[in-house]
Image: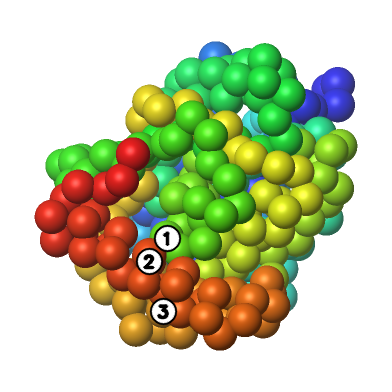
Amino acid sequence: MSEPVVSILMPFHGACPTLCSSVSSVLAQSYQEWELILVDDGGHDDVAAQAPISVQVSARASAQAFAENDSRIRYVKTQGGQGAAVARNQGLEHAQGRYIAFLDADDRWHPSKLERQLALMVQTGAALSHTAYERQLPNGQVLARVPARARLSYDDMLGPNLMGCLTVMYDRERLGTQPMPNLPLQHDYALWLRLLRLGGDAVGVDDALAYYRVSPGSLSSNKRHAIRDIWRVWSREENLPFWHCAAALWRYGWYSLRYRVLNKPEA
């Protein structure tokens, strides 16, 4: 296999009935010069009880089978239970591509996602990009469409996280290999801020080219912990003064009100 252009990091933990769907959305990409690194973050290697009996196969066995059948897919086993940031960073250590992209094992991509995103980055010379995406229930019902701005600056991001992790791609030839800070929450947001500081504005494709699966009780839905960690990003990772953090928190709260309550996210 020739050296891949895009390295896709996909951590998974324990039994994951959606892994096959997520991997299949990568296999279906119109742009095919990629590698997919499946990072096994441990957990019980039991069957996915939620899945139909005909597809009750453990995530670990599925990941290993994908890797055996396609040379572009690699299976990486971690010590387990260290969280998504550590799992992604361990996958990053194995990445060979110029561009780094992220997709979790319960999310999916539109078939043209990589092709359109790469074309925009080449056209604009941007080192960081993202796309719009849909938030969906497990049954496929669309809860919301999250837009992508044509240009997104560091200052724009001091408030809400306007780039979904499943949509982001960065050029490590320009920005270097950048691991995520080891935070329980907001590790992706902390990385986006660092990349924006290093490489300037991000560009966006304002079409929903990714699909985020919303699970009740998920870690990211705990708003109190999210606010604690996002403040930590501003104050410790970005070293912002208190007043700057307070202003960012106000913008975060206002966006959350519009998006979560009024369902009117800022464009």
Callout 2–callout 3 Cβ contact below 8 Å? yes
Q: Is residue 216 above or below residue 201?
A: below
Q: Amino acid at mark 1?
A: Pro
Q: Which mark is residue 252?
A: 2
- The x and y percentages for residue 178 are 78, 56
Q: 199 or 46: which is nearer to us?
A: 199
Whether residue 158 is situated above or below residue 125 in the rendered picture: below
Q: Say which of 77 and 125 sits in front.
A: 125
SS class, disc 3: helix
The quadrant in which the N terminus is found is top right
Along the viewing direction, whichever of 212 and 196 lies nearer the viewer: 196
Mark linked to residue 227: 3
Visible residue check, residue 106: yes
Q: Is residue 25 visible?
A: no
Residue 50 shown left or right of residue 168 in the figure: left
Q: Which residue is tagged 1?
A: 160
User: Disc 1 vs disc 2: Cβ atoms closer than 8 Å?
Assistant: yes
How is the model colour-coded?
rainbow
Of callouts 1 and 3, the N-terminal one: 1
Residue 36 percent coordinates (x, y): 66, 39
Q: Quadrant of the C terminus?
A: top left
Q: Residues within 10 Å of mark 2 (few under 14, many from 20)?
A: some
Q: Quadrant of residue 210?
A: top left
Q: Residue at x 62, y 81 (%)?
A: 241
- The part of the image, by quadrant, that contains residue 188 is bottom right
Q: Calculate the distance from the C-alpha at mark 1 to the C-alpha at mark 3.
A: 10 Å
